[in-house]
Image (cartoon, helix red, strand yellow):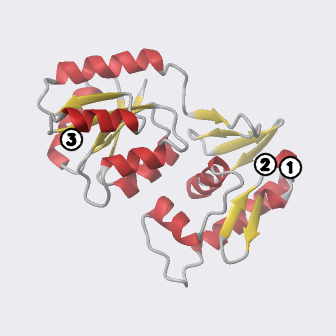
Amino acid sequence: MKKILIVEDDSIVSTTLKKQFEAYGYEVFQAFNGAIAMRKILSVAPDLILLDIGLPDKSGYDVCKEIRAFYDGGIIFLTANDNPKIEIACFDLGADDFVSKTAPFEVLLQRVKRLDRVFDKPLSEQLLSDDGMVFNANNFECRYQGITIQFTQEEFELFYYLALNEGKPQSRQNLLHILKGLQYNGVDRSIDIKVARIRKKVKEAGLPTNIIRSIRTKGYQYNCPSKC
């Protein structure tokens, strides 16, 4: 069964599409703004994303640009605007297709089926090619050279996001926004607590704790295990 994430702020449109795709055997998830979409991608690893352009917190363009930094699955833009310039902009940002909201559902379904064939590799388990760490979003588990590390969902999402940005410091503010949709107030220590728990589990598995390195005044940075 393929997983579809619908990123659409109109609940009627989103729920209608959800029911229609579920009738064809798809597993469908919903996100009603860009921040929620980021968290859903990390937690459910969808095979395909249906992305609206006009979202309340940020544009679909911005969401597409951000997720293309780590998401390799299919992206189809949905929009009520048929302006050719918008279609071109969508493809320039890395979208795989563009469908008007006025088109019949059957048209969208065929576009989704086409991408099903293109992206036929399961995305629920992802290998970071330059790292060797395997992340499985189905059970929030990581494996490295035969060593298994079991995380909670929030720990997994944090560790996975840091790993996807290997070598790039991530501020607490950015991590809170991506993972919880919250703004950092200078007091919240939830990210620090989760990092401590991740480090403990990593150490118990026999891996170096400096896989996640503290960067003074900047936040946290993931280091490839082979470089630790």
Identify the amino acid type marked 2: Cys
Drawn side of residue 140 relative to residue 228, left or right: left
Q: Is 162 above or below relative to 133?
A: below
- Of circles 1 and 3, which is in front? 1
Q: Quadrant of residue 77?
A: top left
- Give the CA separation, mark 2 to mark 1: 5 Å
Q: Position of residue 159 (x, y in %)?
A: 65, 54
Residue on which disc 2 sits: 224
Can see residue 18? Answer: no
What SS does tag 1 mark?
helix
Relative to the observer, which residue lies in front, 157 or 92? 92
Give whichever of discs 1 and 3 has the lower sequence position: 3
Q: Position of residue 23 (x, y in %)?
A: 25, 24
Q: Do tag 1 and tag 3 residues touch (Cβ < 8 Å)?
A: no
Residue on which disc 3 sits: 15
| Residue drawn at x 87%, y 53% as measured from the top left | 228
Q: Do tag 2 and tag 1 residues touch (Cβ < 8 Å)?
A: yes
Residue on which disc 1 sits: 227
Can see residue 57? Answer: yes
